[in-house]
Amino acid sequence: MKPHRPSTRSTSYKIDIFICVGLALLIWGVFGQTLGHDFVNYDDRVYVTQVPQVSGGLTIPGIIWAFAHAHAGNWHPLTTISHMIDCQLFGLRPGAHHAVNILLHTCAAILLFAFLRNTTGRIWPSAFVAAVFAIHPLRVESVAWIAERKDVLSAFFFMLTLIAYARYVRQPSPRRYVTMSIFAACGLMSKPMLVTLPVVLLLIDYWPLARSTSSKLFIEKIPLFVMAAIVSVITFVIQVRSPNATAQFPLLWRVENAVVSYVVYVGQLFWPRHLIVFYPHLENHFALWQVVVAAALLFAVTVAAFQVRLTKPYLLAGWLWYVVMLFPVIGVLGFGLQAHADRYTYLPQIGLLIAFTWLIVDLAANWERRREILAIAATASVLLLGACAWNQTRVWKNSETLWSHVLAVSPENDVAHTNMGIVLMERGRTDEALSHLQTALDLRSRGAPAQNDLSLALIHTNLGFAFAQKGDVDLAINHLRMAIASQPKYPDAHYNLAVVLAQKGDVDAAIAEYENTLSLRTDDVEARISLANALLQKHRLRDAIAQYEAALKAAPHAAFAANNLAWVLATTPEDTLRDGARATKMARMADQYSDGTNAIFIRTMAAAHAESGRFDDARQTAQIALQFARANHDVDLARELEEDVDLYQRRQPLRDPNLTNASGAP
C-alpha cells in the first residue's frame, strides 16, 4: 500500500486561510480599541454628525442628494451613502461607525493578499505586503478616523477591481470586463483619488501579469480612462469652487512641496515617527538644497528601476504604482492647506511595499538559512509596526487627545491650536479656548497674509464664536467681519455672523447673512432653518414656510424644521395658511425623529390636533407635554401648557399672535 500524502493544493489552501485569519486578528488587535473611541471635531461633523441628510439615515431623497451634491468639498456618493447606512443601523454611536471602518480595512488587506498570491504565486511575500499594509502606523489615520471612510471603502473596491481584472486577463469575457468595470466605478464613487486606477492596471499588466506590451492593453482600458476623466472633471470643478482650494499657494511652492513630500512619504514608510493629523504647509520655507536633493533621489530611483526592469520588473511596477497613485494628492493641483497627510499613502505605498519585499526576497536567494532569517525579520517587523500603530491609534480616542498629541509634536501648529480652542469652547472652558485661538492667530499672522486667507478666516470665525459665548457680541461681530474680509466665500463665517446679529437683535442683517450662507452652501439645512426662524420674527410667514419646506426636502429627518412648520400651520391666525392635517403630519414626523420626549414638539402635536378639531386628543397630548416640562423643571413652558390644556378643554384651538404676516393680511 502506498502511504497517504496530503495534496499540495490542500496544504496551500490551509496556509491561505491561516494567513487571512492572521491578518484579521492583527487588524482587530491594533484597531479594535477604536470601538470605544468618539467622533472627533475634525471633519467627522461635516461627514456625519452635523449633516442632516446623512445623520437622518438612508432615504431616497438622501441617496439622490449624495449623487447630486458635493459633500464636504468632494464628490463621493458611495462614501456618503455608506455613512447614511451606518446612521440608519446604528444612529450616532461612534463605536459602530469605527467598526465598519475596521471591517472594510480588514477586507481590503485580505483581498490584497489574495490578489498578490494569485498573480505572483508567492505566498509569504504576499502575506508580508498585506500584513504591513494592514497595520503600518500610516494606516491609522485612514482606519481610526470615521471621516476617512472614503479611504477604506475605495480600497475595498480597488482590491476587488484588481482581482476581477486578473480573472479577466486569465480568461477574457465581456461579463468579466463589466464586473471589473463596475468595481472600478464604485471605487471612483468612493474616493476620486482612484482616477489613476487605469494606469495601475497597465502597470500590473507589466508585472506580475507579464502581458505583452501592445496598444491593445491601452485600448481595452479606454472605458476606464473615460470614467476616470469624468470623475476628475467633476472633482476639479467642485474643488476649485471650494474655499479650501490652495490655488492661493503659488505654483512654485506647490511643486517644491510635492517633490519633498514624495521623499517624506518614503521615509515615513521605514521610520513612522511623529505622525500627526495635520502637517502645516511650509509655504516658501524649503531650502533649495532640500528640493534639489529630493528631486535627485526621485530621478535616481526612477532611472535605476528602469535600468533593471528586465531582471527585476517588480521594482519599476512598484515604484511607478507609488508615484502615479500619489500624484492626485501630492499637492501640485493644490487642494487643502496641509503639506502632506498620512492618509494619502493608504493605497500608493502598496507599490513601495511590493518593490521592497520582492527585492529583499531576490537578494536573499543565496543566503544560508534564508527562510528562517526572513521569517524572523518579517515577524519582528510586523509586530513592531503593529505596536507603533496601536500606540498611534490611542491618539484618536477623542478630539482633545488628538489635538493634544499634535501640539506635543508640533507646538506651532495653528490648525491644532484652532481645533483645540473649539474643543475647549464646547466644554465651556472659554478663556482657555481664547488663549489657543489667539495663539493660532499670532502664528498665522507671521506668514504672508495673502496666502493665508482661509486659515485666518477659520481662526477669526472661531474667535467670534468664543467671544459670543462670553457675551461680548460687538467683539464677536468684529472678528466675524474680519473672517469674511479674509475669505468672502467662507460660509461658516457668514452663518456665525448671522447667529450673533440675531442674538444682538438685528434680525434684518441676520437674514441677509443667512442668505449669504445659503448662496455659498445651498445644502446647509441648519442655515435654512435659522433663516426661516428669522423670517418668522419679521412676520414673513410665507417666506418662512418656503424655507422650512426646502429644508425638509433636503433633509426629511430635520426634526426642528418639521416641528416649526407644524407650529405655523397649526397656530397662525392667518386662515389661508393654516392646515391642520398637514400640521399633524409634520408634528408626528418631528416627534418621531426626537424620540418622543421633547415637550415642545409634543405641544406642537397637541396644537395640530386642536386645529384639526380633535380637542380630546389635543388635551391629552398637552397633558403629556406638561408632564415632561415639569420633569425638566421648565417653569415657563409648563405654565404655557397649563393654559393650552384649559383652552382645549373649552374646545378652542391655539393661536400664536406672533405668527401674522407683515402686512397684517393673508
Image (spheres, grey):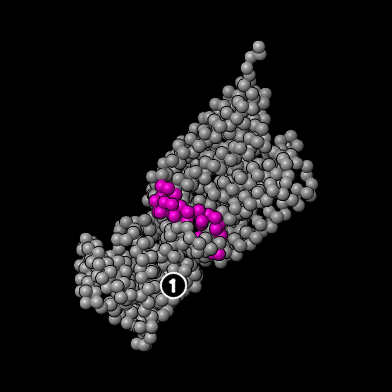
Image point 25% across, 78% down: which residue?
652
- Residue at the spot of label 1: 549
The answer to whether residue 295 of the structure is visible from this angle is no
Whole-percent x, y for residue 623 in the image: 23, 66
Horizontal side of 472 relative to 452 (left or right) equals left
Would residue 258 be found to the left or right of residue 222 on screen? left
Q: Residues within 10 Å of mark 1 (few under 14, many from 20)?
A: some
Residue under the point 75% across and 48% down: 217
The part of the image, by quadrant, that contains residue 121 is top right
> Taking the image as drawn, is residue 188 in sight?
yes
In-image side of 441 versus 623 (left or right)? right
SS for callout 1: helix
Q: Give the range drawn in magenta.
A: 68-97
Main secondary structure along the magenta-highlighted residues: helix
Residue 204 x/y as whole percent: 69, 43
- Counting the numbered discs, the total is 1
Three-letter code for the amino acid on which mark 1 is drawn? Glu
Q: Quadrant of residue 569?
A: bottom left
Asked if residue 653 lies left or right of residue 39, the reply is left
Q: In this view of the protein, which residue sits in the foreground, 20 or 577?
A: 577
Residue at x 34% of width, y 59% of height: 595
User: As rendered, which of 87 and 509 lies closer to the eye?
Assistant: 87
Quadrant position of the N terminus in the picture: top right
User: Per the image, is 71 magenta?
Assistant: yes
Seen as rendered, the residue at the extreme right is 214
The spot of residue 493 in percent (x, y) is 43, 68
Magenta stretch encompasses residue 269:
no
Q: Quadrant of the C terminus?
A: bottom left
Compared with 343, 624 (above or below) is below
The residue drawn where x is 63% and y is 46% is 161
**216 above or below 641?**
above
